[in-house]
Structures are given as C-alpha cells and as structure tokens.
Image: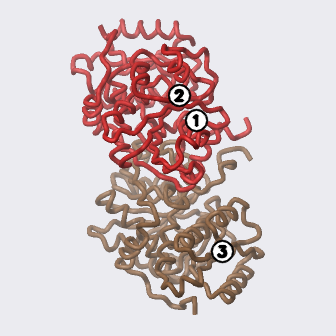
Chain colours: A red, B brown
Amino acid sequence: MPVSMSPALPTDAHIRAAHERIGPHVHRTPVLTCATLDRMAGATLVFKAEPLQKVGAFKARGAVNAVFSLSDEAAARGVATHSSGNHGQALAYAAARRGIPAHIVMPETAARPKLEAVRGYGGRVTLCPPGTRAREQALADVLAATGADMVHPYNDPRVIAGQGTCALELLEQAGPLDLVIAPVGGGGLISGTALACAATAPAPRVLGAEPANADDAARSLKAGCIVEDDAPDTIADGLRASLRDLTFAIIRAHVPAIFTVTEEQIVTAMRLIWQFMKLIVEPSAAVPLAAVLAHPEDFRGRRVGVILTGGNVDLDRLPWMPP
Amino acid sequence: MPVSMSPALPTDAHIRAAHERIGPHVHRTPVLTCATLDRMAGATLVFKAEPLQKVGAFKARGAVNAVFSLSDEAAARGVATHSSGNHGQALAYAAARRGIPAHIVMPETAARPKLEAVRGYGGRVTLCPPGTRAREQALADVLAATGADMVHPYNDPRVIAGQGTCALELLEQAGPLDLVIAPVGGGGLISGTALACAATAPAPRVLGAEPANADDAARSLKAGCIVEDDAPDTIADGLRASLRDLTFAIIRAHVPAIFTVTEEQIVTAMRLIWQFMKLIVEPSAAVPLAAVLAHPEDFRGRRVGVILTGGNVDLDRLPWMPP
C-alpha cells in the first residue's frame, strides 16, 4: 500500500526531526530585511529567503524529508508524484541525493523549461494529457508498475513537516515575531508554518495570503469545508491548488485569517522585492508582501515574518514587460 | 584643506577598525553557494552577496567608513563627491545615517532613476555638464562653498579600508579560500580585498576581472604605470573608472593577474546568476564569474571566493531583452 489513506497529522516533533534529517541536503537560507519595505509597510518585516534554497524554492524541504524518511527497502522502489511545478523538481532533487528513481507525472502542456528542470535533476518524466483524471490515471499506472512511494505535493505529513522547518529556522534567526505570513496554495507550507509557530512561546499568529483569483482557502475557512477552485486564473501559478484533508484540518485549527490580493497587487509586490531586495521571487512568493501592503492596519508596528517561497521564473517573460 | 594630497595607504588594521565602525550601519551580507555554477566552473565557488547590502552594493561600506571616520567638527560641514552611480547613493545614505549633508555632483545626463535614488537617500544633487573638467569644477565649487569633506569614490584610504571589510567577512564566513576574485573599476574594492586577504594566513591569491572594453587596469599592470581608458564602452557601467595612485600602488603590490572578459561573457554570467542563484546582480557584478567561466584552467578544483558587488539595474531594460 504505497498510499496511506488517513495519515496522522504531523506535530512539532516531526518538524524538529525533519529539520535534523534534511540538514545535509538543503540550505539554511538567510533572513533578509529591507528598510524601504519596512517604511512602506509601517512594520518590521523579516523575510525568509527561500528562493536561495536548493531547487530555488522551499519545496526542497518537504521532498527531502519524505525521501529520507523512507526505509531502504521502500526507497529502493523509488518515489513518484504529479507536479508541473517546483515540487516535481524538488522530488527529483531529493531522490537524486538518495540515489533512487523519481517518477514525475507532468501534463503534456507543461512549459519546456519545467520539463527540462525536472530532467536536469535526474527525474523520470511521464507525460499525460491535461486534466485531473488523466493525471491520476497516469500516476496510478506509474505506482502500479514501480511500487514507488507516492509523495503528494502537500497533503502528506512528511511533506508538511518538511515545509515546517522553514518557519522553525525563521524563528531561530529572527527572534520573537508577532506575526508570520505565508502564501496558501494546497496548504503544505502554511500548515507546517502554523505547527512550527504554535509550538513556540510566545507563539506568533500565522496568517495566510492567496490570490483573489484562487481564493479557495479563504472560502474553505468561511464555509467550514473544503471548497475547490474551478480553473483558477492567477499569475501566481504555485498557488492554484486546493486544500486537502490534512492541510484543511491544520489551517482550520491554527490559521485565523487568510488575506486575498489582486493580480495587480501581486505584480507590484513582486517588482518591489526585485527592486529593493535584489532577490528574484516568482509571483506566488510575492503574495504575502502584497497582503501586508494591502492591509497595513493589520501589520502596523508589528514584527512580521514573511516567507518568500521561491524564485523560479522565466527571465524572458517578466510580468511588467510588454508581451 | 579638505582634500589630502598624499594620503598613506590603508592597512589591515584600518580594515579591522572600519569593520567595527560600520557594523551598526551596514548588513553583514550572506555568502551563497550554487551547485550548478560549481559544476559549470569545475570549482567550489563561494559568493559574497553584496547586492543584499544597504543601497544594493558594497559601496555602502566605504562611504559609511569615510563618513563615520570624520570628527564631529568636520562632519558638521558635510561630505561631497562626484558620482553617477552607486557611490553617490552610498555617500548620501552614509551621511543621512550621521545626520549630515551629502553633496553629490552628477552629470546632467545621468539617468533619472539614479538622480532619484540619491535624492531618496537625502543627498543634495548638483548637476553639471558631462565631462571630467566640468565635473571637477562643479565639485571644487561645492567644496569651496561648503567646506565639505571630499570622499573620492575609490582613491581614498577610508573608502578602500571600508571596501576591504567585504573580504574580511567573506574569509570569516567561507573559511580558507585558494583564490578571491573581484571586479576592477577604479580599484577601490580590489585594493581593500587584496589588503584583507594579504593579512590572512594562509593568504588566498587575489585576482581581478574587468571588461575587455575597459581594460585599463590590466594594461596599467603590464605598463607599470597608470593607463587610462578613453571613453570605455561597456555594459558594466560600474567599471568604467580608471585606477588612481593609491589603488594602482596596492594592486601592483598584491594582485598578480587581472582577467578581461567580453561584453557577451558578462551578459551570459549575469543571466546565470539571476537564473541559478536567484540574485539580482548588475552587469559589473557578473564580471568575476564571467572570468572564472572563461578561464576554467585557472580555477579548476579550487575554492574560490567571488565578490558579487551590487544589484542596481533598471528592471525595465534587461540586457537579454529586445530593446
């Protein structure tokens, strides 16, 4: 049974164990500050710079934790996932570090650089037609044929615990924070962040941020049940996924608010980070700063940890350039 | 006499004093590594990330050291310089931290964002016609009118000592290095770097890198006297200046080789840093990596410190984009 049907929620202890486990394989990324953005926000912002992480995104943390949690016997059969984004690269990277195969199911429509990036890390790509059904069938075929361990992009306690190591480091590096804000896609990062922060004393409040055009998490929190986005149209391509049972349960328990921001606010915040922090961030990574600037009353005078998630962009197509 | 005519060369002790002095006003920037660039170079590269420095460039170090070296009495009269680039912003920033005026002489032809950046830090801009003579006259007028202390962009022992703090930190952060490579414009950074490295045991060799289109430093080393560039045409706009007496003396004594690279090699290296390190660097900052990639035989198998100098670019005009 490679896929566990009802895994237990991860805990702070899992995050600490993950941090130990992944240490040799990921960067302890620096935290950065920026006087100009502090002035704009009226707050003290401490940015955790995950674009400087292996594979250019925090996703390396969860993938490495999942891969290095496997027994030697299970690991020998490899790992598998579906992803057209950073998780696919991260799992390929993690598997290569352990010397085992990674099978990545990707839609035929995926951008060529993303395919090449996965292959560049040694991942074995299985192409499938676009759409959830075709993707799940392709993944089921791969799992059946290989016996690989399925590593879901976010609804996996090993992945959530791995992503939680980012906030664990942030809290060590930044000292006490009033608030921590992270973007919400499928919810893996903010779930790990919330668990790490809840175990800290004093515990910072954890807030989410997502595109208004992919606001399933905010709507799910309000509705009290998982609401899915129907073909979300946002430049923040890392945040198009919907919550699943584990991430919804954790967010419901630990995240009091999720802000939504417009596409324009995302691009503005992305450019501000490039201009004033000299850090390349992808649109998804700019969503928390966009929320801070759009809702200054919620952040003014506070010490705020901001997780900058990743920096994988197409340098030939920047959103502020004419097409 | 605000301008000293024959100041003594700075020493390692000046660099250590500078490091202490500037600590409260500048960032201790992180060092970064990149597995992809290591593979490309066949070497272990440790990058000092000065784009993450105050004002986006190492120039903050020298300017802060100069400003905070002044007596209260001298400081009250302010500081002055000519600069159309990062030094102007850095001096304005440093003066603002001390609460004194900074007079920055800039050519009327300077790009609007550069003017605005200097003014944004509180600098008082004096515009002059383009050309060396008009600039020197304008600066002399400012000095006569204000009694301000002249802080040359590089031929000033306080500035050289300040720039040397960058290598001092790099050596602390990276551990033993075989080589350190830095770009050469007027020579302030590499002079400070060479002094800091020469005082370390074992001392890494310090190498320079400059655009072939602005190769005055390489030619000066060969000629044994200062050779000036005549209107150098390079995208690396931070490296168009020529050596002066202090920097030439230090480079001659401590820098065995200066590599030159083509414009194309500079743009390629700049893009590699953006793509794989997720750090925004200006063209000048990419010159050392360009040299490492162009001369692999000189770096293969070595531990190489690479100083990434700054990240101030116009995000609307990237060199790999059509105009």
- The answer to which quarter of the image holds residue A179 is top left
* Label annotation for residue A238: 2
Task: Tell whether label 3 touches label 2 (CB within 8 Å).
Answer: no
Kindly check if marks 1 and 3 are in contact, taking CB atoms under 8 A apart as contact: no
Disc nearer the start of the sequence (2/1)? 2
Q: Are marks 2 and 1 in contact (CB under 8 Å)?
A: yes
Q: Residues within 10 Å of mark 2 (few under 14, many from 20)?
A: many
Question: Which residue is under mark 3?
Answer: B104
On the image, the x and y values in percent for residue B43 come to 37, 50
Q: CA distance from mark 2 to mark 1?
A: 8 Å
Residue A51 lies, in percent from the top left, at 47, 41
Dot 2 falls on a residue whose secondary structure is: helix
Which residue is at the front of the view, B317 or A187? A187
Mark 1, secondary structure of its residue? helix
Regarding residue A282, the answer to whether it shows in the image is yes
The residues tagged by marks 2 and 3 sit, at their Cα atoms, a distance apart of: 44 Å
Q: Which residue sits at x=72%, y=75%?
A: B126
Q: Tag 1: Cα neighbours inside 10 Å, few (<14), some, or many (≥20)? A: many
Q: Chain of mark 3?
A: B
Q: Say if A46 sits above or below A54 in the image.
A: below
Three-letter amino acid code at disc 3?
Answer: Ile
- The circle on residue A283 is 1
Whole-angstrom CA distance, mark 1 to mark 3, is: 37 Å
Question: Could you say which is closer to the camera, residue A147 or residue B108?
Answer: B108
